[in-house]
């Protein structure tokens, strides 16, 4: 069989621990035997970040800017314990944070729906993708403790307002956001919905925060009207604004299958709720989308350190490769679409189907067996071999 051709390289960002191991297995067993894989490789593992004083992360971000599509393995965000473990000269920032800032992008998380797995909300038959705005609001909030007799004022060059005059002890807070960040967020959300061919919902509380949340609502509407209306109509999808509480109620009664854009705090909370309702952390994928249409696909989970410790001790583990696999298929499909390579895009679909067929056979990783309430537990290697057998049949 001739290998499937690629024309533009994917930006490949390798990572740490168990996910680095699974990354190599997926490439070796499920990709390179079938695809003439072209990647520009960046090693974002902690030892490599240490060796380059983290310059490799910015190099990878520039490559994504240049080529348009990347695929990333999970990476360690160092803390005090990791600083000792890896003998680091300083605490490097999270690579995901660096990439997000460099690309001015938004992270979209979507669950992988398994045949036979019923979400906790049984009407959700299609994935719900949550987009969380990653800048400002309470995460950059400034707080004060109010004492009896204090008057807290919000002062700007354009004027001053009294927040509250305290008659007894209490608390106060101020927060901000910027048009630049909201515009970038809105553009990434419209790009994501168009990419997925799904409706976009945006919700906030503009009845209460008429200026603050009103600005978000107006910017979303402006970006839609001026930049995306025609493309949405062509694709047969809709943009829909509603109040956050109404959106929550509608979401619970929906059948899923939409992209939900949320402000920073709302997205923080809702992404955990949606994730838990759809199943396991290991079945959550994530894509970083820039306002100019650059894509970085990855698994939402981390490097699975607990399993890595067991692997280091020579044990096999039943670590789920699905989200890593779907990061690769997402990136290959996107590359195929952008380069007009239908073989490549359809390979991505066949690989996903092979994974679903292997799950149907019943020899699965522990988390999947738990989610489905059936099946025999196999290790990662066994599960990947089963996927390969199905893939070979379908090609
Ligand atoms: P984690 O790697 O997501 O793992 C937490 C737990 O979730 C695991 O111990 C395991 O539970 C379960 N799990 C996650 N992925 C799984 C999979 N593929 N298959 C089976 N079970 C899975 O989170 P963490 O342990 O908090 O973080 C580990 C490292 O990852 C940290 O250094 C952190 O900085 C980094 N991290 C990176 C990213 C990223 O690069 N995007 C994201 C998050 C965290 P059981 O042990 O119960 O089986
Ligand atoms: Mg959260």
Image (cartoon, helix red, strand yellow):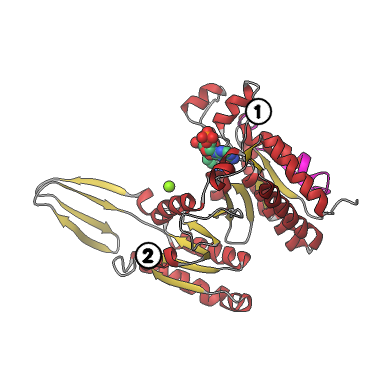
Q: Where 205 sits versus 331, above or below?
A: below
Q: Where 86 sits versus 381, above or below?
A: above
Q: Which mark identifies residue 316?
A: 1
Image location of residue 356, percent across then percent down = 67, 52
Residue located at (69% from left, 49% from top): 355
What residue span does the magenta drawing correspond to? 28-49
Residue located at (77% from left, 60% from top): 346
Q: Where 175 sits versus 22, above or below?
A: below
Image location of residue 71, percent across then percent down = 67, 48
Q: Which mark identifies residue 13?
A: none
Judge by depth and name the residue closer to the eye, 309 or 338. 309
Q: Which mark identifies residue 244?
A: 2
Residue 77 visible in the displayed image: no
| Mark 2 Cα shell of 10 Å, populated few (<14), some (14-19), many (≥20) | some
Outermost residue, right side = 1
Horizontal side, residue 300 vs residue 269: left or right: right
Q: Quadrant of residue 382?
A: top right
Q: Is residue 35 magenta?
A: yes
Image location of residue 61, percent across then percent down = 63, 47
Q: Are marks 2 and 1 in contact (CB under 8 Å)?
A: no
Element type where label 2 sits in the image: helix
Horizontal side, residue 213 vs residue 377: left or right: left
Q: Quadrant of residue 161?
A: bottom left
Disc 2 under 8 Å from ligand 2? The reply is no
Number of on-image labels: 2
Horizontal side, residue 266 vs residue 57: left or right: left
Horizontal side, residue 96 vs residue 8: left or right: left
Task: Indicate which disc, 2 or 1, sits on the residue closer to the N terminus.
Answer: 2
The quadrant of the image that shows the C terminus is bottom right
| Mark 1 Cα shell of 10 Å, populated few (<14), some (14-19), many (≥20) | some
Image location of residue 122, percent across then percent down = 48, 60
């Amino acid at each position: 069989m001739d290998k499937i051709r690629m024309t533009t390289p994917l930006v490949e960002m390798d990572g740490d621990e168990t996910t680095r191991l699974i990354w190599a297995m997926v490439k070796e067993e499920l990709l390179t035997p079938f695809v003439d894989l072209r990647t520009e490789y960046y090693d974002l593992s902690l030892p490599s970040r240490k060796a380059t004083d983290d310059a490799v992360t910015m190099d990878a971000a520039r490559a994504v800017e240049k080529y348009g599509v990347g695929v990333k393995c999970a990476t360690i965000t160092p803390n005090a314990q990791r600083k000792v473990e890896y003998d680091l000269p300083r605490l490097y920032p999270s690579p995901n944070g660096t990439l997000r800032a460099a690309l001015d992008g938004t992270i979209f998380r979507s669950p992988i729906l398994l045949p036979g797995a019923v979400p906790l909300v049984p009407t959700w038959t299609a994935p719900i993708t949550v987009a969380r705005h990653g800048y400002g609001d309470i995460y950059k909030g400034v707080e004060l403790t109010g004492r009896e007799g204090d008057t807290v004022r919000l002062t700007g060059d354009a004027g001053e307002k009294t927040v509250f005059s305290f008659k007894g002890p209490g608390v106060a807070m101020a927060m901000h956001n910027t048009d630049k960040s909201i515009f970038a967020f809105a553009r990434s959300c419209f790009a994501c919905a168009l990419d997925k061919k799904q409706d976009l919902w945006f919700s906030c509380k503009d009845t209460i925060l008429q200026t603050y949340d009103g600005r978000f609502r107006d910017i979303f509407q402006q970006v839609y009207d001026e930049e995306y209306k025609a493309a949405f109509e062509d694709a047969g999808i809709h943009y829909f604004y509603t109040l956050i509480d109404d959106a929550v109620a509608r979401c619970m009664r929906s059948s899923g299958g939409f992209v939900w854009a949320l402000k920073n705090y709302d997205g923080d909370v809702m992404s955990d709720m949606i994730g838990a309702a759809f199943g396991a952390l290991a079945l959550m994928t994530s894509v970083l989308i820039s306002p100019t249409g650059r894509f970085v696909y990855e698994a939402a989970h981390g490097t699975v350190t607990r399993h890595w410790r067991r692997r280091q001790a020579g044990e096999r583990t039943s670590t789920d490769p699905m989200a890593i696999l779907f990061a690769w298929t997402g990136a290959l499909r996107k590359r195929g679409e952008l380069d007009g390579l239908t073989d490549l895009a359809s390979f991505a679909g066949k690989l996903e189907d092979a994974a679903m067929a292997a799950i149907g056979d019943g020899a699965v990783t522990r988390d999947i067996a738990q989610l489905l309430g059936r099946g025999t537990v196999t290790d990662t290697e066994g599960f990947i071999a089963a996927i390969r057998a199905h893939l070979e049949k379908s090609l």
